[in-house]
Image (cartoon, helix red, strand yellow):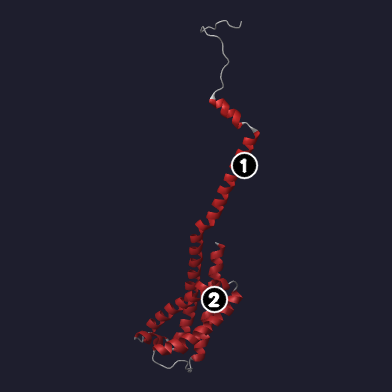
Amino acid sequence: MPGLPTKAGLPQTKPRPTPARYVSTFTEQPLLQAYLSKVSSSASTKGNTTMSATSPVAHQPHAVTHHLARRISAGVTGGIAGGLVFGVLMAMMGILPMIASMIGSNSPLVGLGIHMVISILIGLGLTVPFAGLLKTYRRGALIGMAYGALWWVLGPLLIMPMMLGMPPFRVNATAGWSLMGHLIYGIILAVVAVRVLKHADER
């Protein structure tokens, strides 16, 4: 009956809501739930966008290194291949001692060594800046032929005579053979470079 003491000797009172109950009741409101859901969704989207935006930056140095490495590999390989074939022609024409004379020697082996170093450097001069042009073997052969002709003008007709103290652009009996050798070198250089670049893309 009302007013009767309880077992503890006190009148029964209605239990008071705890703070946790107030929080639970507050968070169960529909408007608040919708707002919290919107905030959570916005934060998740922003985090994904940030990760997507930074991912290419993280991979960019690796991509640049890979592209440079494949271009260097193509230039070195193509330069060696073309240089060896051209070196045989130069040995048959007896030009190697003249190349060696640029450093005060007359040894054909020294001349061949100088020729191979130059062949590799010229190969890099094609593939490092212009690898994007070497898409097909046909285009590569045409570009290589033009590149070889360019170096026939720059090398035997301009740079080498100036280094040997002779007048530049002087065409002699071996000029035709030298032009043919430079054209063959350029074609082999570019075609081999195309193959190396294609192989690197397939890996």
Contact? badges 1 and 2 (CB < 8 Å): no
Give the quadrant of the C terminus.
Answer: bottom right
Of the numbered discs 1 and 2, the one sitting upstream in the chain is 1
Q: Residues within 10 Å of mark 2 (few under 14, many from 20)?
A: many
* In front: label 1 or label 2: 1
Q: Amino acid at mark 1?
A: Lys
**In the image, 32: left or right of 108?**
right
Above or below, 144 against 6 in this view is below
Please name whichever residue, 45 or 70, is drawn nearer the observer in this view of the structure: 45
**Callout 2: helix, strand or loop?**
helix
Residue positioned most to the front: 3
Give the quadrant of the N terminus.
Answer: top right
Please name whichever residue, 64 or 18, is drawn nearer the observer in this view of the structure: 18
Residue 39 in picture, x, y percent from top left: 59, 42
Q: CA distance from mark 1 to mark 2?
A: 59 Å
Residue 188 in picture, x, y percent from top left: 53, 77
Point 42% across, 90% down: residue = 161
**Callout 1: helix, strand or loop?**
helix
Residue 192 numbered mark, or none: none
Residue 107 in picture, x, y percent from top left: 36, 85
Please name whichever residue, 107 or 129, is drawn nearer the observer in this view of the structure: 129
Q: Residues within 10 Å of mark 1 (few under 14, many from 20)?
A: few
Q: Amino acid at mark 2?
A: Ala
Residue 63 in picture, x, y percent from top left: 51, 61
Above or below, 195 against 175 in this view is above
Disc 2: which residue = 190
Disc 1: which residue = 38
Q: Quadrant of residue 40?
A: top right
